[in-house]
Image (cartoon, coloured by chain):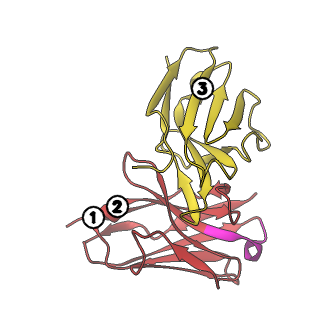
């Protein structure tokens, strides 16, 4: 059981916009930055969004993050086949004094 | 290029031991906290342990406390994870990653090394 809650799956067709939610509590998302990771099949996770809505160099602006209260979301616009991957949200948890992750959302591009 | 390369994974019997290594390159290793994060087959990411830049501040997840030991050698740009009294539920891909203290900011990640605990 992950501390942060994500839907197990999401899907969309090429060109569509999809959104993945991440729900937490005051001790994690409510009081700290949210991070998003993309894990392509058979590879290591890769930082996709940091500090709620910032993109590392090289990440397309099709990916955007947002946060409100104790929830966050990742939006992917102009969906492409290469976006098919697992997406994880993460945040520092003050109660646990450590980072916590969501259970991951598998995105399928139909 | 910043790079992390893990090694040391393999098949071990329950109760056995294994030592993982993670070699860093491309940045000032001694200036950064380092983490181990694991992923059981078909499951999500779970933080295992962290060590600060000079090795004198260490923390573990409750699931591995007392069995795993993290350490680092800044002269060799390497961190280690000594895993003792391994259990079947420790089976996972173990990733090392560079982190920022007090956040869930992890970048980059190594390619991972698979640890399988089975009789």
Q: Residue B91, labelled with which disc? A: 2
In the image, is B103 to the left or to the right of B92?
right
Q: Residue A19, labelled with which disc? A: 3
Colour seen for chain B? red
Q: Determine the residue positioned at 56% across, 33% down.
A: A21
Q: Nearer the viewer, mark 3 or mark 1?
A: 3
Mark 1 to mark 2 CA distance (whole Å): 6 Å
Point out residue A43 in the picture as x, y percentages from the top left corner. 53, 46
Provide the residue span drawn in magenta.
Answer: B27-34
Point out residue B110 in the picture as x, y percentages from the top left corner. 59, 58
Query: Which one is nearer the viewer's eye here, B88 or A4?
Result: A4
Please report contact status of discs 3 and 2: CB closer than 8 Å, yes or no. Answer: no
Q: Read off the chain for label 2.
A: B
Asked whether A33 falls inside the magenta stretch, the response is no
Please report contact status of discs 1 and 2: CB closer than 8 Å, yes or no. Answer: yes
Query: Which one is nearer the viewer's eye here, B15 or B45?
Result: B45
Point out residue A89 in the picture as x, y percentages from the top left corner. 58, 44
Colour seen for chain A? yellow
Q: Is residue A37 above or below residue B83?
A: above
The quarter of the picture where residue A63 lies is top right
Q: Residue B88, labelled with which disc? A: 1
Q: Nearer the viewer, mark 3 or mark 2?
A: 3
Characterize the local packing of mark 3: few (<14), some (14-19) or many (20 or more) Cα atoms within 10 angstroms: some
């Amino acid at each position: 059981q992950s501390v942060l809650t994500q839907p197990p799956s999401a899907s969309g067709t090429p060109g569509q916009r999809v959104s993945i939610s991440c729900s937490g509590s005051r001790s994690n998302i409510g009081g700290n930055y949210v991070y998003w990771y993309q894990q392509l099949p058979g590879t290591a996770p890769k930082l996709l969004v940091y500090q709620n809505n910032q993109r590392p160099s090289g990440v397309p602006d099709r990916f955007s993050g947002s946060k409100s209260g104790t929830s966050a979301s990742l939006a992917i616009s102009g969906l492409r086949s290469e976006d098919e991957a697992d997406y994880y949200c993460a945040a520092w948890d003050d109660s646990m004094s450590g980072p916590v992750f969501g259970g991951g959302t598998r995105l399928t591009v139909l | 290029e910043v790079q992390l390369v893990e090694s040391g994974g393999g098949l071990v019997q329950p109760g056995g031991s294994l030592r993982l290594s993670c070699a860093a390159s491309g940045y000032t290793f001694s200036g950064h906290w380092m983490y181990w994060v694991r992923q059981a087959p078909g499951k999500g990411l779970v933080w295992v342990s962290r060590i600060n830049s000079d090795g004198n501040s260490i923390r573990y997840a409750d699931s591995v406390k007392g069995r795993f030991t993290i350490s680092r050698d800044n002269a060799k740009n390497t961190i280690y994870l000594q895993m003792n009294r391994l259990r079947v539920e420790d089976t996972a891909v173990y990733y090392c990653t560079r982190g920022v203290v007090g956040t869930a900011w992890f970048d980059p990640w190594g390619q991972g090394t698979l640890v399988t605990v089975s009789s």
